[in-house]
């Protein structure tokens, strides 16, 4: 896991210092990937980009995972989440997946999920929460897209305090279309956690987590 940490502090009423930290976590290339919902399904966990859209008319959804083991609290401490922001970067857009030729408006939604190691059963796995829309339009190559997921990650970790991964599924709405459909090659691509080389490594998915321990 690659991470950077910033630290601030303040005092509680009883004069005990609360140390607030912000950690920036890169997505885990070994657990990132996208699934094409063909028959049988195709799991791609080694590509340097992730597809939300269609491949030959078959819908594809993307998955990104963040290792948060570095902030796991000791047994006598409680992890308190203050802010969590998901950031991804556009690698390319093909055709018009958001307002395409079929006159259907689409957005990319981020779902908080727990898929562990990616396999074909994760394509439509039940989500812990729909975290909202990360984009409703292309932004251009290298454009940054952010989504505040504080509430959902905080709730998830309260209920799953031993979890060491935060994982998301990103998908276009209304992505279940026929192979012969006019949108059969439309897609939105983001960089994955794979090594992108010196120039593009900074465009891998990132999770910024601000927290303290009590």
Image (spheres, rainbow, N blue to C red):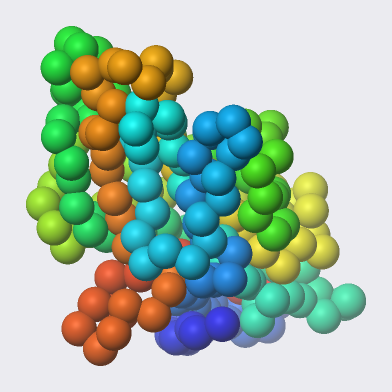
- Please state if 90 lies on the left or on the right of 21 as rendered: left
Q: Note whether 66 is above or below 21 in the view shown.
A: above
- Please state if 182 lies on the left or on the right of 168 as rendered: left
Residue 25 image position (x, y, % from top left): 49, 74
Q: Note whether 66 is above or below 75 in the view shown.
A: above
**Residue 27 in sight in this render:** no
Name the residue rendered at 39%, 16% in the picture: 178
Name the residue rendered at 79%, 48% in the picture: 159
**Residue 165 in sight in this render:** yes
Dividing the image into 4 quarters, which one contains the C terminus? bottom right
Name the residue rendered at 24%, 77% in the picture: 200
Question: In the figure, residue 116 lies in which quadrant?
Answer: bottom right
- Please state if 80 lies on the left or on the right of 159 as rendered: left
Name the residue rendered at 34%, 32% in the picture: 56
Question: In the figure, residue 204 lies in which quadrant?
Answer: bottom left
- Please state if 202 lies on the left or on the right of 129 as rendered: left
Q: How many marks?
A: 0
For the residue pair 188 and 46, the one nearer the viewer reads as 46
């Amino acid at each position: 896991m690659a991470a950077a940490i910033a630290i601030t502090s303040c005092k509680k009423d009883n004069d005990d210092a609360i140390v607030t930290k912000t950690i920036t976590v890169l997505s885990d290339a070994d657990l990132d990937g996208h699934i094409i919902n063909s028959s049988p399904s195709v799991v791609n966990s080694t590509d340097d980009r992730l597809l939300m859209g269609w491949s030959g008319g078959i819908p594809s959804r993307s998955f990104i995972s963040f290792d948060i083991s570095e902030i796991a609290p000791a047994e006598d401490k409680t992890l308190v989440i203050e802010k969590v922001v998901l950031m991804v970067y556009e690698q390319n857009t093909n055709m018009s997946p958001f307002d395409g030729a079929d006159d259907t408006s689409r957005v990319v939604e981020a779902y908080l999920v727990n898929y562990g190691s990616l396999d074909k059963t994760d394509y439509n796995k039940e989500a812990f929460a729909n975290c909202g829309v990360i984009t409703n339009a292309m932004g251009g190559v290298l454009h940054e897209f952010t989504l505040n997921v504080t509430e959902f990650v905080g709730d998830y970790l309260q209920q799953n305090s031993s979890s060491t991964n935060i994982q998301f599924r990103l998908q276009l709405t209304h992505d279940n279309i026929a192979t012969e459909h006019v949108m059969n090659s439309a897609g939105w691509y983001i960089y994955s956690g794979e090594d992108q080389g010196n120039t593009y490594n900074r465009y891998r998915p990132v999770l910024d987590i601000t927290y303290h321990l009590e």
